[in-house]
Image: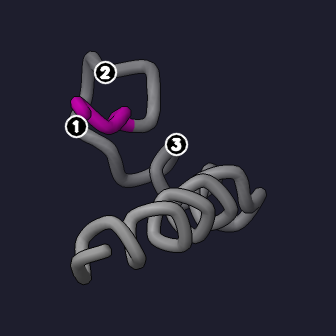
Amino acid sequence: MDLTERMAPALVEHSERVMNDARVKAYYAEHWIAGLTAVPSRSW
């Protein structure tokens, strides 16, 4: 198993945990580009 296969699940879990944190959501709600209504999602 290579590094990517070992690290990807932990990185996805971390990303989801961070993006679901109320403080992060509040930051993006206040600072995100006008006209966009959602926190950016991953494209993978």
Residue drawn where x is 58% and y is 70% of the image: 14
Q: Which mark is residue 29?
A: 3
Q: CA distance from mark 2 to mark 1?
A: 6 Å
Amino acid type assigned to the residue bearing label 3 in the image: Ala
Does label 3 or label 2 sit earlier along the sequence? 3
Label 1, residues with CA under 10 Å away: few <14, some 14-19, many ≥20: few
Q: Residue at x 32, y 44 (%)?
A: 32
Label 1, on which residue?
33
Residue range corresponding to the magenta coloring? 40-44
- Identify the residue position indicated by label 2 in the image: 36
Left or right: residue 25 compared with residue 44: right
Label 3 crowding class (10 Å Cα cut-off): few <14, some 14-19, many 20+?
Answer: some
Q: Is residue 2 above or below residue 37?
A: below
Callout 2 amino acid: Leu
Rounded to the nearest whole Å, what is the CA distance between mark 3 and mark 1? 9 Å
Q: Is residue 13 left or right of residue 9?
A: right
The answer to whether residue 1 is left or right of residue 19 is left
Which one is nearer the viewer's eye here, 43 or 6? 6
Q: Quadrant of the C terminus?
A: top left
Q: Above or below — where is 36 with respect to 12?
A: above
| Disc 3/disc 2 C-alpha distance (Å) | 9 Å
Which quarter of the rendering shows the N terminus? bottom left
Decide: marks 3, 1 in contact (CB < 8 A)? Answer: no
| Overall secondary structure of the magenta section | loop
Secondary structure under the numbered disc 1 in the rendered image: loop
Along the line of sight, the residue nearer the viewer: 19 or 35: 19
Secondary element type, mark 2: loop
Image vertical order of residue 22 relative to residue 1, above or below: above
Residue at the location (70% across, 51% down)?
20
Whole-percent x and y of residue 15?
Answer: 51, 62
Residue 2 against residue 27 in the figure, above or below: below
Mark 2–mark 1 CB contact (< 8 Å): yes
